[in-house]
Image (cartoon, rainbow, N blue to C red):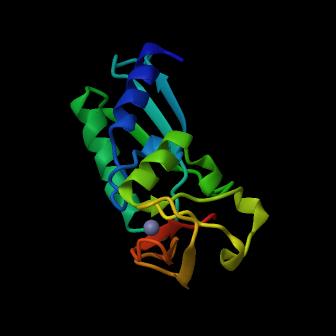
Amino acid sequence: MTKSEEEIWQILEKISDPEIPVLSIIDLGIIRSVTVNDNTLDGISEVLIHYTPTYSACPAVDMINAEIGVSLHAAGFKNLHLKQKLFPAWTTDWMSEAGKEKLIQYGIAAPIGRSCDNGKLEELKIVCPQCGSNQTILISEFSSTACKALYKCSSCLEPFDYFKCH
Ligand SMILES: [Zn+2]
């Protein structure tokens, strides 16, 4: 990895997901590659970033794009190519362990298991992010967004979101 590429990864680490601000886009695992060509004719480094949006129809995608553009521009990277890579599709498996930890602290139960397990929500033992109890009940398969399910804890009686495997 070149020095510029390292610098860009560090900048991207500071860009948060508009829907879950505690998660950076690196935590989400949506950045597939960062390539910098420093040997251009005009001396301006050429940056190529491939990323896979979490949900292609998500309005957050435009916000993330804009944020990446502004942040890199501010750091002096003025020639940026941002390319979507839709295959393979993003899965919760790409979310970092640190990201899952941050989700729980934010009050959202992190995805359990691998996306390919296709476990039924009713069969999962979801732990309450508030009190740590595993006495939780599924209220609705869809919460504020389609990617989350709504649960209620039988111990502390608080409702909470579970970030579904996907
Ligand atoms: Zn609880």
Query: Which residue is painted at 61% across and 47% down in the image?
Result: 94
Looking at the image, the residue that sits furthest to the front is 155
Q: Quadrant of residue 12?
A: top left
The image shows residue 69 at horizontal and vertical percentages of 31, 43
Looking at the image, the residue that sits furthest to the right is 117
Q: Is 59 above or below relative to 28? A: below
Closer-to-camera residue (135/152): 135
The image shows residue 110 at horizontal and vertical percentages of 53, 57
Quadrant containing ligand 1 reads bottom left
Q: Is 65 above or below relative to 130? A: above
Looking at the image, the residue that sits furthest to the left is 74
Q: Is 135 above or below relative to 14? A: below
Number of disc labels: 0
Q: Quadrant of the C terminus?
A: bottom right
Residue 148 seen from this side: yes
Q: Quadrant of the N terminus?
A: top right
Closer-to-camera residue (1/117): 117
Residue 56 seen from this side: no
Q: Is 120 above or below relative to 72? A: below
The image shows residue 103 at horizontal and vertical percentages of 44, 53
Looking at the image, the residue that sits furthest to the bottom is 140
Closer-to-camera residue (79/10): 10
The image shows residue 11 at horizontal and vertical percentages of 34, 32
Query: Which residue is painted at 60% across and 56% down in the image?
Result: 92
Q: Quadrant of residue 44?
A: top left
Query: Which residue is painted at 55% across and 74% down in the image?
Result: 136
Closer-to-camera residue (1/158): 158
